[in-house]
Amino acid sequence: MLGIRGLLGAVADTMTCPLRPDDYWAIINPLWSRRELSGRVAKIIPETSDTSTVVVRPGRGWRGGLAGQHVSVGVSIECVWHRRTFSLSSPPGRPDGLIALTVKARPDGLVSRHIVHGLRPGQILRLGHPSGRFVLPDAPPARLLFVTAGSGITPVMSMLRHLAEGGAMPDVFLAHSARNASEVIFGAELRRMAARFPTMSLYEHHTRPTDGRPVARLTMAGLSAICTDLPERLAWVCGPRGMIDDAESYWRESGIGDRLVTERFHPVTFPGGQGGRVRFARSSRETTVSGDTSLLIAGEDAGVIMPSGCRMGVCHSCLAPLVRGQVRNLRTGEEHGIPGDLIPTCVSAPARDVDIDL
Amino acid sequence: MAASTHLSAGDIEELGEELDRLRAEVLASRGEDDARYIRRVIAAQRGLEAGGRLVMLASLLPPAWLAGTAMLTLAKILENMEIGHNVLHGQWDWMRDPQIHSTTWEWDSASPAAQWKYSHNYVHHTYTNVLGRDRDLGYSMLRVTPEQPWHPIYLAQPLYNLALAVVFEWGIALYDVEIEKAWRREKDLGETLNHLGSALMKVFRQGRKDYVVFPLLAGPAFLPVLLGNLTANISRNIWAHTIIFCGHFPGGTRTFTEEEIEGESRAEWYLRQLLGSANINGPAVLHLLSGNLSHQIEHHLFPDLPSNRYAQIAPQVRDLCERFGLPYTTGSLPRQTANVWRRILRLALPGATRPTAGETSSEPVTST
Ligand SMILES: Cc1cc2nc3c(=O)[nH]c(=O)nc-3n(C[C@H](O)[C@H](O)[C@H](O)COP(=O)(O)OP(=O)(O)OC[C@H]3O[C@@H](n4cnc5c(N)ncnc54)[C@H](O)[C@@H]3O)c2cc1C
Ligand code: FES
C-alpha cells in the first residue's frame, strides 16, 4: 500500500520533476534535505593541542547507528568538497539529537587540519550513514579489553559513553597510548570514568612523558603482563598500523584470533602496480595515474562524482562495476579483471588501462 | 591545417598561448565568489519558480496570472540558460558538489541531459561551424550558410524557423536523437529508438507537470494555469532560440570545411572558435538571462570556465583580437537578431556567395 504519505510524496515528485522536492527544501535549509544528508556544526571543543571534537546537528533523514561506527563526512574547503571517514565519539541516541566527531589534525592532512583549525560553528558538513563492524555485541560480554592509541580512542569513547549511560559498567580494561598525559584525548573524562566505576581499569601508556625519559611503544606482550587476564577478554583495538599489526599477530598466535576486533584508520597497502589510463565511462572522464593511486582518488581528482564511505576497503560504499581492464587490489596486491566485477575503488589501482562504469 | 586567415603559424601558436594563459588565470582564481554566485542563482531560480507557481494558483485574477506567468518564464529561462546549460558543461564540477555537477544534473528541458551533453558538448563544441560535422549548423533543417546546397524545401525555411522557435525545446530533444543519422544508417536503430524512448519519457514527465498536475492543483483556475505554463514554456523556447541563433549565425561568423580542420592544433581550434562565434552586447541582465551565451566567443573558447567569468575576460579576449587583427563579432540583440533573420530569408533562395551580400557586420574591434 502506498499510503497517504507515499501518495503525497509521489505527487510532489511529479511537481518538481526533474528535481526532487528536497532540492527546494535544501535551498531554505540544507538540513531539510534527505537526498543529501547534511549536518550543521553546533560547537567545536578543543581536546588536545592537535585534536578537536566537532559537535554536529544532523539533518532530517539521519538514522543513527551503533557505538563504535563511523560516518563518511564531506567538508567544503575553499568551496571544493572533500570526503573522509570519521568515527563517532558520541554515544548513539543522545537526548539532544547531536552527534560528535573527534578529529586529530595530521601534520600534512588536508581535511583533518581544516576540521581542527578552520571549521566554525554554523558551517555545513555532508554526512553519510553510520556503518562499520567495530561495535559491541548485542549482549556485551562480561569482560572487555580496549587497546587504543592517539585518535584511535574515538570509536572506543563512543562505546564507553554508551556503556556508562546505563549507570553500570561491565568489567572493562582500557589501555591507551599517547605521548604524555596532556595528549590523551578525552583524558579528563576517562580518568573521571575510571574513578566513578570500580569495574573500569584505565592504563595510560605515555611514550614521551613530560618528566622522564622516552618509553618504548605499547606492545601486546607488554600489555599481557599488566592486564593478566587478557586472553579471557573480548578485545577491541584501534590505533596506528604498528599497533594493529602487533595485536593481530599476538591474538592469532595465542590461538584466540576470534576474540579480537580491530579498526584501521588507514589501509595497509601493497603498492607496486604499473598504473595506466583510467576511463570513467558514464562521466566521460579520463585520467592517467600511477600504480599506487586508488581509482577513488583518481576519479575525484578527475572531477568524477565518486561514491565513497570508509575509503579503506571495508564498507563497500564505493563499489563500481569494471567495464574492462585489469585492477590491482592495494590491500592484497592481487590483480584481477573480469568485466562486470564490482571493484572497491578506494583500494583498487589500475594494473594497466581500465574502464570503470561510473 | 588552420582556417585561412592572414595569420602565420607562429602567430596562431602565440594566440593559443595567450588564451591558454588567460584560461589558467581563471582556473587558478576560482573560489568562494564563484561558488556563491552559482548557489545564489540556483536559489533565486528555485524561489522564482515556486513563487510563480504559487501566485498562479490565484490566476482567476488577471494580475496574478500575469505576475505568475512572468515569474515562471524568468525561472524557466534561468534554469535552462544560466544554470542547466552551464552546469551540464561542467563549469561547476570543480566544486565536487554532487548537487551541482555535470554528471548528476538533469534539467527542465525536453532533451535528456545525457543526450544533450553528447550532441552539444561533444559534437557542437568540438566541430563548431564545420560543414558536415557540426549538426548545430542549421540543425539539419535550415540553410544558414551559402556552402549548403540549395533545395526547394528551403523556400519555406523562414516559416519553419518561426515554428522551430515556438517548439524549440522539443525540436532540440528530437534533434538530439539524431533520427536522420539512423535513417542514413550511420547510427544503430536500436540505440536511436532507446534515445527516442528516453526523450519521449522526459517530454511526458515535463508535460505532466506543466499541463496536468499544476492545473489540477489550481482547481477552478485549471485553464488559466495551463495557459500560463504554456506561455512560460513557449516564451522560454523563443528566447532560447533567439539567443542561440545569435551565437553562430549572424553575419561575420565563419564556417569551415572538413579539410580545414584536418590535423588542427589546439591553437587552431581556438582560432576557429573565435571566427565562428558572435557575442551580443547589452546590460548585465541580458548576460544573466542568456546564460552568458551573450559571451558566445568567450564561451566557445573556454566552454568549461564558470559563466560568471566570461564578462570579466571579455575585454582581454577583445584586446587579443585587436592585437592579432581578428574580428570580434558583436552587436546588440535586436541588431544580431535582424541579422540572423536576414540571412535565413536570403538563404531560403538559391545562390548567395560567401560572405552573403550586406552581411559583413563584424564590428571593428575598437568599438564598444
Ligand atoms: C574507519 C575510519 C575511521 C576513522 N576515524 C577517525 C577519527 O575518528 N578521527 C580521526 O582523526 N581520523 C579518523 N580516520 C582517519 C581519517 O579518515 C583521515 O584519513 C585522516 O583524518 C587524514 O585525512 P586528511 O585529509 O587530513 O589527510 P590526507 O591529506 O588525506 O593525507 C595526508 C597524508 O597522511 C597520510 N595519512 C592519512 N591518514 C592517515 C592515517 N590514519 N594513518 C597514517 N597515515 C595517514 C596520507 O597517506 C597522506 O600521505 C578514520 C579513518 C577510517 C578509515
Ligand atoms: S569506501 Fe568503503 S570500501 Fe571503499
Image (cartoon, coloured by chain):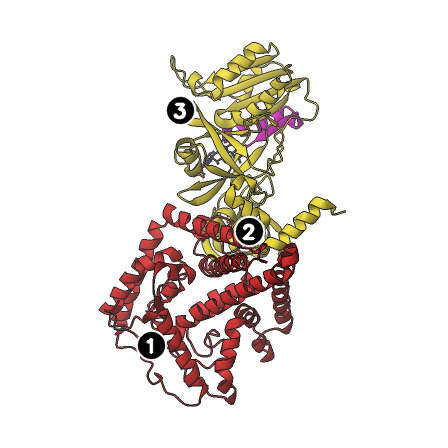
Chain colours: A yellow, B red
* Residue A259 placement, left or right of B12: right
- Alpha-carbon span between mark 2 and mark 3: 41 Å
Task: Report in which chain the residue with disc 3 lies.
Answer: A
Q: Which residue was labeled with disc 1?
A: B252
Whether residue A312 is visible here, answered yes or no, is no
Q: Which residue was labeled with disc 2?
A: A327
Report whether mark 2 lies on the same chain as mark 3: yes
> What amino acid type is highlighted by mark number 2?
Val
Q: Secondary structure at mark 1?
A: loop
Whether residue A297 is visible here, answered yes or no, is yes
Query: Quarter of the image holding residue A48?
Result: top left
Q: Secondary structure at mark 2?
A: strand
In terms of depth relative to the viewer, which is nearer, B115 or B225?
B225
Q: Position of residue A77 (x, y in %)?
A: 42, 41
Task: Report in which chain the residue with disc 2 lies.
Answer: A
Residue interval drawn in magenta: A240-264
Rendered position, B328 above or below A339: below
Numbered label attached to residue A49 = 3
Q: Residues within 10 Å of mark 2 (few under 14, many from 20)?
A: many
Q: Main secondary structure of the magenta part?
A: helix
In terms of depth relative to the viewer, which is nearer, A116 or B215?
B215
Most extreme residue toward the right is A1
Q: Position of residue A340 (x, y in %)?
A: 63, 55
Q: Residues within 10 Å of mark 3 (few under 14, many from 20)?
A: few
Select label 1 or label 3 by which is in front. Answer: 1
Rendered position, B152 above or below A209: below
> What amino acid type is highlighted by mark number 1?
Gly
Select label 2 or label 3 by which is in front. Answer: 3
Residue at the spot x=45%, y=53% of the render? B93
Rendered position, B317 above or below A341: below
Q: Is mark 3 within 8 Å of ligand 1?
A: no
Rendered position, A301 above or below B19: above
